[in-house]
Image: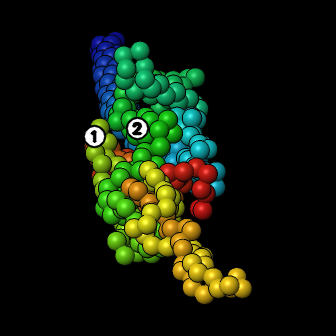
Amino acid sequence: MKGILIGTFLLIAILTLVISGVFFVVLSNQFINTKISLKSSEILKSVEVVEAVKIGLDIAYNYSFFQAAYEIGKTGGYEDEESKKEWRVYEATYFPSFYIENVRKKTENYICEYLKSLEETVNEFKFSQPSVRLFYPDEEGKAKMIVSFSNLFTYSKEFFTIYENSSRVVYIPVEYFKLYDTGYRLYIEEDEIRKMIEEAEEKMDLDCRIIKFDEICEQNKTDREEVLNERCPNADEKFKEMILLEVETPKSNEVNIRIYVDEIKTKHESSESYEGLSESPDCGCKRSVPVCEEKDEEGNCTRWRTVCVEYYKKYYNLVYTYEYFGAVKARVNITTKSYYRVYDPEEGDTRLRNLTLKFDVVTSNDYNWKPL
């Protein structure tokens, strides 16, 4: 009987150990599965965060370019206001041939600022230094930006790290570069404002430019300026108004062009020409001398008459010609037809705006006359 009890107790003890072991194994597996599940969930959430950031990078790269292009364009392609120069000062030109490099550097700076802000906001992110290259035109005639990094960016948690590629090839609007192409062609290769001044002169009333006389005696010939004031009062002011009308009329083709005149000077010079000039009895006597017709026995003249020895001259086809000169200091504003979301510090907001190229020009229709 005693042996049976001991055997029973041993059996119970063994069963208890076996059941406990089973329960331990089950609970341990459940814990491991729960732990794996939690880790998997954390990884999945992290992957979603990384994917969202990858989408955000594309937006950030585009925005960085637009903002840089907008700001460099406002300083005429130069790096900042301090280094800005007028594109043309009469025959001298100062085109910023390095404008693409200026846009590239500013774009790179904005991308750096964005990534640094992202790292400060989400400590798990780490980015290497970005490198930006701009190509216009590329082999296909397009404009593109390549953003590259020396290393993959990382998103790190306690038990895992995600590695991703943040390098991108971004196609950027060709029309921004058309601003510079158009500006170079019209205001560097050519002098479009000078042409406008010349066109304004051609559109002056004929009486302001040429005054003709078929025949006129020299004593009736009037000073050229007096004649101009009679036929075309305030000629220089009229010429100034004509220049403003020509210059400040908006132009549009691939881009929009608007010119604003800051200062303008005008003057005119006159000259005369004629086909012939000779004495003419029709014009009257200019100089006469007394001639004795009769003398007395002693040789004294008793009767005199006046003889004309020089007649006034007559001009045949006399022409007064007036040449007008204009000098202009103007602000050229060339803008894209499309709109892009950028921030303007002067207006203090971010919204859709035209990308703009602004520069100054000083010119005249005679580079030898430089009053500005």
Residue 328 visible? no
Q: Say what amino acid the circle numbered 1 marks.
A: Asn
- Which residue appears at 47% of the width and 32% of the height? 155
Q: Say what amino acid the circle numbered 2 marks.
A: Thr
In the image, 277: left or right of 208?
right
- Which residue appears at 49% of the width and 58% of the height? 278
Instruction: Give the answer, above or below, for where 342 lies relative to 229.
Output: above
Disc nearer the start of the sequence (1/2): 2
Q: Which residue is mark 1?
A: 253
Q: Quadrant of the N terminus?
A: top left
Here the colouring is: rainbow
Residue 18 visible? yes
Q: Nearer the viewer, residue 196 or 39?
A: 196
Q: Nearer the viewer, residue 143 or 362?
A: 362
Number of the label disc, if any, that sits on residue 263: none
**Dots 1, 2 in contact, CB < 8 A:** yes
Q: Position of residue 130 (x, y in %)?
A: 55, 31
Q: Position of residue 249 (x, y in %)?
A: 30, 56
- Secondary structure at badge 1 equals loop
Residue at the far right: name it.
Answer: 298
Q: Quadrant of the C terminus?
A: bottom right
- Which residue appears at 30% of the width and 48% of the height? 251
Instruction: Give the answer, above or below, for where 139 lies relative to 152.
Output: above
- Secondary structure at badge 2 equals helix
In the image, 38: left or right of 188?
left
Number of the label disc, if any, that sits on residue 182: 2
Q: Within 10 angstroms of label 2, few (less than 14), some, or many (20 or more) residues?
A: some
